[in-house]
Amino acid sequence: MVNFTVDQIRGLMDKSTNIRNMTVIAHVDHGKTTLTDSLVSKAGIIAVEKAGALRSLDTRQDEKERGITIKSTAISMYFEIDKAHLPAIEQETVGNEFLINLIDSPGHVDFSSEVTAALRVTDGALVVVDFVDGVGVQTEAVLRQALSERIKPVVVLNKVDRGLSELHLTKEALYQSFQRTIEKVNVVISTNQDTTLGDMQVYPDQGTVAFTSGVQGWGFTLRQFATQYSRKFGIDKVKLMRRLWGDNYFDPTTRKWTTVGTDANGQPLERAFNKLVLDPIFTVFDATVNLKGSLPDVLAKIGVTLESEERELTDKPLFKAIMRKFLPAGDSLLEMIAIHLPSPATAQRYRVENLYEGPMDDESAIGIRDCNPNGPLVLYVSKMIPTSDKGRFYSFGRVFSGTAKAELKVRIQGPKYIPGRKDDLFIKSIQRTVLMMGGKVEPIEDCPAGNIVALVGIDQFLLKSGTLTTSETAHNIKGMKFSVSPVVQVAVQVKNPMDLPKLIEGLRRLSKSDPCVQCLTPETGEHIVAGAGELHLEICLKDLEEDHAGVPLKFSEPVVPYRETVRAESTIVALSKSPNKHNRIYVKAEPLGDEVTKAIETGKISSRGDSKLRARVLADEFGWDVTDARKIWCFGPDTTGANLLVDTTKGVQYVNEIKDSCVAAFEWVTKKGVICEEAMRGVRVNLLDVVLHADAIHRGGGQILPTMRRATYAACLVATPTLQEPMFLGEEEN
């Protein structure tokens, strides 16, 4: 039985201090969706018995068939937490009711763009690690992504039941395994964390690590055990928590704590974690699975009573039934989320610098920082979700400032919008606001700052993502940087030529529905779909054929695109004369260098930021000349690519008048390179000198653009042009 109503959720939306927006992230098959079932069942949305097996947030049929999550799914849940936990919350809180907006994300590397879209709208991350397999490659990748977005992590070591039933580990071996895994997670955090946020590492004795079995639905944090023992023995809970991890031993003869593993007689002492935390679990396991000891005595000791039908169970099902009552996983996760993850009111103060492109003192930035529901609306749409009839899309995103409501007229700013211009800008009204509840939606009247929402009626004005605002001076929320790029391409054709319009409409819908997929139509007239990997492409093509286009299709074999680059500086200066012979352009090409190329691709150096800051980074970190770094005219292709046009001319007249034509020519060249018309990567083009006609009519775009294009092609041809192919970087674990 669902133990909350939409009205209760709407009531909590106004208390931004009691909201937790979080994403569950992990390596593929480490148990994210199974674990979220424990929280969903605690909220009463699914039956406790089904939790762990139902995978309620895998809403698509192919997710159920393949056993993996493909699309990130959001759900909003209302919880009341134990008032005893409230003093441990270090941020401002009102009452003990909490709204948790949880997003379950995919673990497969091909779908990491879904993780990026989920992380952008949340403030905390639940990092699930299979303690048997350890920290996977994808765990590191998504954790790095989360930290770059200034998202606070807490860790869950999952599949603890495997340590008991499959590996038959001793208590000490289990502890050592836990410690090694936590250490690996902390290494990733410490090498990638943002210094302004302080220490983001996780520690079991501070309650930021939980130990669970998602499939059996039980789990614990050290805070839970410390609470039980402090009630029983009257000891301070916080002091006891610190003793329950690390080299701490309790000597029963002297009744004192020690950090030495032996007593006065040289007899070994048992570690506090093993004795006080693992021992009760091992005792239950022995009594149920290994049939050692008296079960009624064990149940009396841990305070669990079984129903009559549960008493008839044996072996693992009995262990599962007892552990679910003794240590319900939902309780431990909920307590950790409420205490240790930040509320929007806390998180937006330090995230605003990373999120907002404009100045930090304008009304929108102040509204975001204060998480002000009465400020100007600033809402970031991170992805599009198809409606149940597949015809339209919900625009899924987060309200950072103001309140989103139906009939509100908003400025819809696409990723290329520049304040003061009309490009990539629409002014329309929101039709409806809804809450995403797994595979279902619930209508709500409005949605204040700090919450996650889906909007109806603006999908035709945005491609994949964008910013909605009511302020005319608002800049965009920064675009998302995906850790994977669409490198596997397939040509798509219809079997029946009559269905071509349906295919074109289907491609338009497909490119909306996935943050990473690209649908291209080159001059050859083919329709190309590009995805991050073969699995991603397979899922996209299945969606295209069955849902978006709904017509039979033919697909080519997958191919990968190449990139063109240069390996050396141009051996001679390339000179080109304009068609009217009155203007000359002198150009040289050289390699940018791997470090700068990667910095541009990861967003460290961006075309949209402050040019002085960019110049400082290039000069300090990459050894560029400061004057050159300040005179970067353009990034290409598409004004964001990893090629640079640099004006290195000195004292030349009229040079700024030809800038637009030179930039257009450079964009053209970098989009279609000199070898085989593939996009270029990692090339720096230096404009060395120009000789221009004094009369402006003789140096118009028609004269300069083809001249600059020919000169750039020539400079690349004499700079040892070469091809680059994509590389699939994997990691083999023994």
Image (tube, rainbow, N blue to C red):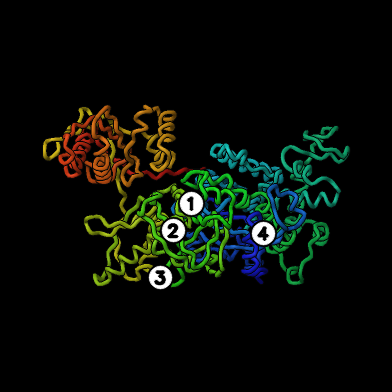
Few, some or many C-alpha atoms within 10 Å of disc 4 (few <14, some 14-19, many ≥20)? many
Tell me the residue at 42%/55% (across/down): 413
Percent position (x, y) of residue 610? 42, 39
Q: In this view, does 630 lie above or below 270?
A: above
The residue that label 3 is drawn on is 391
Contact, CB < 8 Å: mark 4 with mark 2?
Answer: no
Q: Which of marks 3 and 4 is nearer the N terminus?
A: 4
Few, some or many C-alpha atoms within 10 Å of disc 3 (few <14, some 14-19, many ≥20)? few
Dot 1 falls on a residue whose secondary structure is: helix
Percent position (x, y) of residue 170? 70, 46
Q: Earlier in the sequence, mark 1 or mark 3?
A: 1
Q: Which of marks 1 and 4 is nearer the N terminus?
A: 4
**Viewer-closest of 26 and 680:** 680
Give the residue type that dot 3 points to.
Answer: Gly
Give the residue type that dot 2 points to.
Answer: Arg
Query: Can the viewer see residue 303?
Result: yes
State which quarter of the image contains the N terminus: bottom right
The residue that label 4 is drawn on is 98
Q: Which of marks 4 and 2 is nearer the N terminus?
A: 4
Between marks 3 and 2, how big is the CA–CA gap? 24 Å
Q: Is residue 630 above or below residue 11?
A: above
The residue that label 1 is drawn on is 116
Percent position (x, y) of residue 515? 42, 56
Q: For this view, does 265 lie left or right of residue 424?
A: right
